Image (cartoon, grey):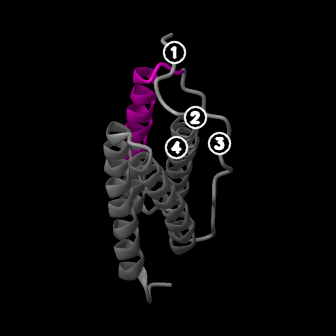
């Protein structure tokens, strides 16, 4: 493996991102199965699609870590958030997505301050996608209001 060519904080952001994105894959996959067991096929498919999108983030983060000469190492997966209904699941998902948005925002800002334009572009790309996920979750939750 090549010697790392990035500062330790960037590597820390990447490691945390990998752990959170793998946690998201686990969370959305589990929620998709749970929702399917409730007979909610369309929401189940949406959650499966979300798991797939998060897995694409995992692959990008791993590729970035390898390009920087470090071995990927997800340190800890979060427990899956479950609930008794779809709205409760989506509230937990929104909180999780907000955490990812904050992480990528912080990482992009750090990259900009420390003259790491490639890292900044990388984190901004993930930030924009997570912000889109957050908007989609908000729209989905609004569409479900009053259906309880």
Upstream in sequence: badge 4 or badge 1:
1
Upstream in sequence: badge 2 or badge 3:
2
Q: Which segment did they paint magenta?
A: 53-70
Q: Name the residue rendered at 31%, 44% in the picture.
A: 121
Residues tagged 4 and 1 counted as in contact (Cβ below 8 A): no
On the image, numbered disc 4 is attached to which residue? 17
The quadrant in which residue 74 appears is top right
Label 2 residue SS: helix
Residues tagged 4 and 3 counted as in contact (Cβ below 8 A): no
Is the residue marked by circle 2 packed among few (<14), some (14-19), or many (20+) residues within 10 Å?
Answer: few
- In the image shown, does 115 or 72 lie closer to the viewer? 115
On the image, numbered disc 1 is attached to which residue? 3
Is the residue marked by circle 4 packed among few (<14), some (14-19), or many (20+) residues within 10 Å?
Answer: many
Residue 57: in magenta span? yes
On the image, numbered disc 3 is attached to which residue? 77
Q: Name the residue rendered at 35%, 69% in the picture.
A: 135
Residue 12 higher or lower than 144, as above or below = above
For the residues labelled 4 and 1, the Cα–Cα distance comes to 21 Å
Task: Locate residue 89, reporting x and y percent.
Answer: 55, 66
């Amino acid at each position: 493996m090549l010697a790392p060519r990035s500062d330790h904080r960037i590597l820390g952001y990447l490691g945390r991102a990998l752990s959170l994105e793998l946690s998201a894959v686990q969370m959305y996959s589990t929620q998709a199965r749970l929702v399917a067991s409730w007979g909610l096929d369309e929401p189940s498919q949406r959650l499966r699609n979300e798991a797939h999108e998060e897995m694409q983030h995992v692959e990008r983060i791993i590729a970035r870590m390898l390009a920087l000469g470090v071995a990927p190492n997800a340190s800890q997966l979060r427990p899956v958030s479950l609930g008794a209904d779809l709205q409760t699941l989506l509230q937990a998902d929104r909180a999780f997505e907000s955490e990812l948005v904050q992480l990528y925002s912080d990482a992009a800002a750090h990259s900009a301050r420390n003259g790491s334009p490639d890292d900044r572009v990388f984190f901004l790309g993930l930030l924009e996608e997570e912000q889109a996920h957050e908007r989609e979750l908000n729209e989905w939750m609004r569409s479900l209001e009053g259906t309880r």
